[in-house]
Image (cartoon, helix red, strand yellow):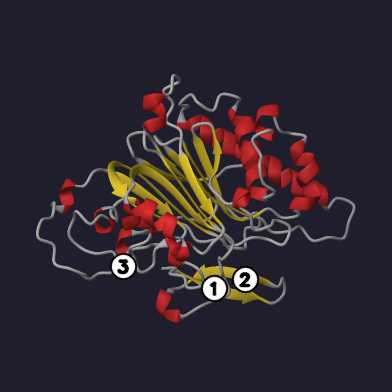
Amino acid sequence: MCRWFAYIGEEPTLLEDVLIRPKHSIVKQIDVHFLPNLHITYDPHHGRKMLTSGVASDKHGPNHLTNIDGFGIGYYTGVAAEFNDDHVNKPCVYRNTRPPLNDLNMMSLCAHTSTKCVFAHIRAGSSFSPTVETNNHPFVFGRYMFMHNGFVGNFLKIKVALLQKLSTAAYTNIFGTTDTEHVAALFFTHLGADWVTELPLEKLKQAMINTLQDVLALIQDSIKDTDEELPLSNLNFAVTDSCQLLAVRFSSIDEFEPPSLYYSTKAGPVLNRKYPDHPDGKEEVPKKAMRATHEHGKHVIVASEPNTYNTEDWHLVPSTSFVLIDKNLNVTVEKIQL
């Protein structure tokens, strides 16, 4: 499975602090994983790995979830809105197929860039989707970014039918071969042709419901008149316009937990070197000048795995749920009704 991380807040965050510095930052989530309140089991009947209730930590050692097929960062600086006539805050995206810890360009960028909204994604590619930069998340549609952890069942069988549902604008915005980018194009088809206007969060939610319904219906149609078992799809999506954020934790088969997903409204100061504490629960160097934790701005982090030591700061998102973050950074977790 892939892994992704999202931060949105009033307070700018240094990319190095949230993406590189922690012991369990996303760039280090290659084959060691930290899953509070979940652990991995194996279902021999279906031949599938499952997440079930329990407690796991990165002390349990490597497991089968290896992510080595590319890395991407998308973030907003406000520069595009300042210099362009449309005044739209569009994201900057950096992608590479090298292991992120060996990417000195990315390290330099992260050490000198802050943002109030960032998406980061480390990829575990599939056999039908090559390891190239155009297949790295997040994907950009106007002012929006979109990323995914999971897979679409029977994607190659439904691809042609899915393409027929796309608007011309969404179709021409596809540059890679992943199931994710095609589903993103379907989402932005439902959202409408205007990807530069700030839209209500409710409209993003409805577009996501329509997208999930379409994908599930296409998969169901793909096994019609066959003996094929309904394939599993894991659809942990995230989309943002820099002002609000929508995330999904979803499995197409109820008895299987989707990939892990957590959110936090408290971990921001721990991930910011201007404040006390350390993401690993220790001090590397005593800080001479710090701001008080309560001075940190309102924020929300949504991530496949926690990247700070204090698990009490993180909430496991229930299966089949939306995480809805509005412009005031209020968080609502609600059941997906399809």
Quadrant of res 313: bottom left
**Residue 110 % position (x, y):** 37, 53
Q: Using the image, determine if residue 318 lies above or below residue 88.
A: below
Q: Secondary structure at mark 2?
A: strand
Q: Amino acid at mark 2?
A: Lys
Question: Which residue has dot 3 on it?
Answer: 309
Nearer the observer: mark 2 or 3; the answer is 3
Q: Nearer the viewer, residue 268 or 230?
A: 268
Q: CA distance from mark 1 to mark 3?
A: 20 Å
In primary-sequence order, the first of circles 2 and 1 is 1
Q: Which residue is painted at 68% across and 57% down in the image?
A: 130
Label annotation for residue 260: none
- The extreme top residue here reads 85
**Residue 181 % position (x, y):** 63, 44
Q: Amino acid at mark 1?
A: Ile
Is residue 218 at least partly visible in the picture?
Answer: yes
Q: Which residue is painted at 35% across and 69% down in the image?
A: 23
**Residue 63 % position (x, y):** 54, 76
Question: Which residue has dot 2 on it?
Answer: 49
Q: Which residue is painted at 54% across and 73% down in the image?
A: 40
Question: Which residue has dot 1 on it?
Answer: 40
Q: Is residue 98 left or right of residue 287?
A: right
Is residue 262 at least partly visible in the picture?
Answer: no
Q: CA distance from mark 2 to mark 1?
A: 7 Å
